[in-house]
Amino acid sequence: MSVSTEQVQQALKGVKDPNTQIDFVSSKSVRNLKNIIAVASGKGGVGKSTTAVNLALALAAEGAQVGILDADIYGPSQPMMLGITGRPESLAENTIEPMEGHGLQASSIGFLIEPDNPMVWRGPMVTSALEQLLRQTRWRDLDYLIVDMPPGTGDIQLTLSQKVPVTGSVIVTTPQDIALLDARKGLKMFEKVGIPIIGIIENMSTYVCPKCNHEEHIFGEGGGKKMCQDYGVDFLGA
């Protein structure tokens, strides 16, 4: 089963109408952004970045103006996923133009460094880089900014929740027990900082044989739905 555009739109409508500007204190506001959606996971390798791109493209296909922010400073993947190369244009007042591809505006540290260059930075430098990418990118009247979060519950997550008006979060998990364990931690973290949970997506639910189309639950079954039942949040699909 796949997550349909209608499911995503319905879940988002329950959080905020995309045509309504959010009211936040001025210290947290970000210019030209109506809704900020964090796509997160407790563990790496569950397909979070792929889900973030697909969510952004699905919303754009519905006619929304959408941007994507790659918040994974240590392991940026959006430039490759979107097939965008080159460097953003630097503008006056310490701002940069977002890169564009597939109808999306995009900003990532990956556009500013060489692909093989590791980011050997401590936490304060990483959080500062995230804030600069968010606030110094000249976003153009976005209905949604999709934020591709790094895995875990560390500095980036805290910075985003404390300094940015996040509308809601989507949690991505896989059916394995270890992935669900970390997804629960991510969900609880967002609850503690007061960010609404839009819902949970279970990725890698089945393997479909290319020869006979038989579906097999090779990583287990039903973990994402059970997690939704346990925490009273919406199951967006698998």
Image (spheres, rainbow, N blue to C red):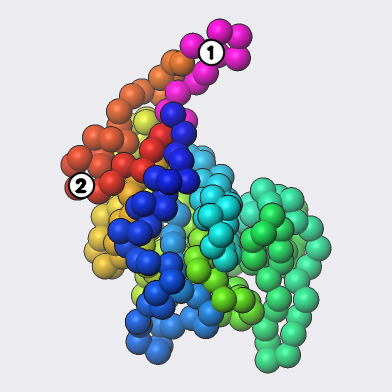
Asked which secondary structure carries label 1, the reply is: loop
Q: Is residue 200 above or below residue 176?
A: below
Q: In the image, what residue occupies the spot 70% across and 78% down?
A: 96
Q: Is residue 9 visible?
A: yes
Is 104 positioned to the left or the right of 15 in the image?
Answer: right
**Image location of residue 140, percent across then percent down:** 61, 76
State the predominant SS element of the stretch in magenta.
Answer: loop
Residue 210 magenta: yes
Along the viewing direction, whichever of 97 and 71 lies nearer the viewer: 97
Measure the C-alpha gap from mark 1 to mark 2: 33 Å
Residue furthest to the right in view is 86
Where is residue 195, by image quadrant? Answer: bottom left
Where is residue 154, by image quadrant? Answer: bottom left
**Image location of residue 101, percent across then percent down:** 71, 58
Asked which secondary structure carries label 2, the reply is: helix
Q: In terms of sequence position, does the residue under pointer 1 or pointer 2 come before the other?
A: 1
Q: Is residue 137 above or below residue 65?
A: below
**Image location of residue 208, percent across then percent down:** 52, 18
Q: State the residue position of label 1.
A: 213
Give the magenta part as a residue range.
Answer: 202-214
Q: Is residue 5 above or below residue 118?
A: above
Q: In the image, what residue occupies the spot 40% across and 89% down?
A: 26
